[in-house]
Amino acid sequence: MFSKARRSFGISIGILLLGFMAIAFALVYRVMRDAPPPAVAEIVSVPAGAEVISAVVSEGAINVTYSMNGVTTLALFDQASGELTRSVVIGE
Protein backbone atom coordinates (compact mmCIF):
# COMPACT_ATOMS: atom_id res chain seq x y z
CA MET A 1 0.00 0.00 0.00
CA PHE A 2 2.80 2.38 0.89
CA SER A 3 4.64 1.52 -2.33
CA LYS A 4 1.56 2.41 -4.39
CA ALA A 5 1.27 5.71 -2.54
CA ARG A 6 4.98 6.48 -3.10
CA ARG A 7 4.72 5.65 -6.80
CA SER A 8 1.61 7.82 -7.17
CA PHE A 9 3.33 10.64 -5.25
CA GLY A 10 6.45 10.35 -7.45
CA ILE A 11 4.39 10.50 -10.65
CA SER A 12 2.46 13.52 -9.36
CA ILE A 13 5.66 15.36 -8.40
CA GLY A 14 7.19 14.54 -11.80
CA ILE A 15 4.19 15.97 -13.65
CA LEU A 16 4.24 19.05 -11.40
CA LEU A 17 7.94 19.64 -12.12
CA LEU A 18 7.37 19.26 -15.87
CA GLY A 19 4.60 21.86 -15.62
CA PHE A 20 6.87 24.33 -13.79
CA MET A 21 9.60 23.78 -16.38
CA ALA A 22 7.12 24.46 -19.21
CA ILE A 23 5.99 27.70 -17.55
CA ALA A 24 9.59 28.82 -17.01
CA PHE A 25 10.44 28.06 -20.65
CA ALA A 26 7.40 30.03 -21.84
CA LEU A 27 8.34 33.05 -19.69
CA VAL A 28 11.96 33.09 -20.88
CA TYR A 29 10.83 32.72 -24.49
CA ARG A 30 8.37 35.59 -24.12
CA VAL A 31 10.96 37.91 -22.58
CA MET A 32 13.56 37.13 -25.25
CA ARG A 33 11.07 37.47 -28.10
CA ASP A 34 9.82 40.88 -26.98
CA ALA A 35 13.29 42.40 -26.49
CA PRO A 36 13.68 45.55 -28.59
CA PRO A 37 16.12 45.46 -31.49
CA PRO A 38 19.40 47.39 -31.13
CA ALA A 39 19.38 51.02 -32.26
CA VAL A 40 20.83 51.67 -35.71
CA ALA A 41 21.65 55.13 -37.02
CA GLU A 42 19.45 56.26 -39.89
CA ILE A 43 22.05 58.44 -41.62
CA VAL A 44 25.85 58.30 -41.97
CA SER A 45 27.86 60.87 -43.91
CA VAL A 46 30.42 60.09 -46.59
CA PRO A 47 32.19 62.78 -48.62
CA ALA A 48 30.25 64.32 -51.51
CA GLY A 49 30.97 62.57 -54.79
CA ALA A 50 32.08 59.31 -53.14
CA GLU A 51 30.92 56.01 -54.62
CA VAL A 52 29.76 53.61 -51.89
CA ILE A 53 31.08 50.11 -52.52
CA SER A 54 29.60 48.34 -49.50
CA ALA A 55 27.93 49.00 -46.16
CA VAL A 56 27.75 46.42 -43.36
CA VAL A 57 26.47 46.55 -39.78
CA SER A 58 28.49 44.39 -37.38
CA GLU A 59 29.56 44.40 -33.73
CA GLY A 60 28.18 47.83 -32.86
CA ALA A 61 29.64 49.59 -35.90
CA ILE A 62 28.54 50.49 -39.40
CA ASN A 63 31.36 49.75 -41.85
CA VAL A 64 31.15 51.72 -45.10
CA THR A 65 33.64 51.16 -47.90
CA TYR A 66 33.70 53.91 -50.50
CA SER A 67 35.87 55.05 -53.38
CA MET A 68 36.66 58.65 -54.22
CA ASN A 69 39.17 59.88 -56.83
CA GLY A 70 40.67 56.37 -57.08
CA VAL A 71 41.25 56.05 -53.32
CA THR A 72 39.33 53.31 -51.49
CA THR A 73 38.51 54.09 -47.86
CA LEU A 74 36.87 52.15 -45.05
CA ALA A 75 34.89 54.38 -42.68
CA LEU A 76 33.68 53.05 -39.30
CA PHE A 77 30.63 54.73 -37.81
CA ASP A 78 29.07 54.29 -34.36
CA GLN A 79 25.95 52.13 -34.73
CA ALA A 80 23.75 54.15 -32.36
CA SER A 81 24.68 57.75 -33.20
CA GLY A 82 26.06 57.52 -36.74
CA GLU A 83 29.23 59.47 -35.85
CA LEU A 84 32.46 58.68 -37.69
CA THR A 85 34.80 56.86 -35.26
CA ARG A 86 37.61 55.82 -37.57
CA SER A 87 38.64 56.05 -41.19
CA VAL A 88 41.19 53.74 -42.86
CA VAL A 89 42.60 54.14 -46.37
CA ILE A 90 42.65 50.69 -47.98
CA GLY A 91 44.18 51.35 -51.37
CA GLU A 92 45.09 54.10 -53.79
Image (spheres, rainbow, N blue to C red):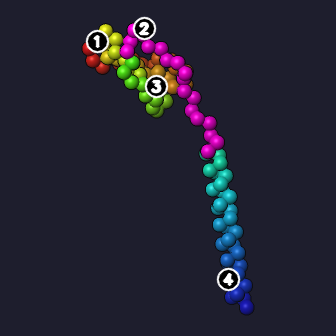
Label whose residue precedes the other's in the sequence (4 or 1):
4
CA gap, disc 4 and disc 1: 80 Å
Label whose residue precedes the other's in the sequence (4 or 3):
4
Q: Which residue is mark 3?
A: 62
Left or right: where does residue 39 sit relative to residue 10? left
CA gap, disc 1 and disc 3: 22 Å
Label 2 sits on a secondary structure element that is loop
- In the image, which disc is placed on residue 48? 2
Q: Which residue is mark 1?
A: 70
Label 1 sits on a secondary structure element that is loop
CA gap, disc 3 and disc 2: 18 Å
In this view of the protein, which residue sits in the foreground, 32 or 48?
48
Q: Which residue is mark 4?
A: 7
Mark 2 neighbour class, 10 Å CA radius: few under 14, some 14 to 19, many 20 or more: few
Residue type, numbered disc 3: Ile
The correct choice, above or below, for 28 with respect to 8 in the image is above
Residue bounds of the magenta highlight: 33-51
Residue drawn 70% across and 87% down? 4
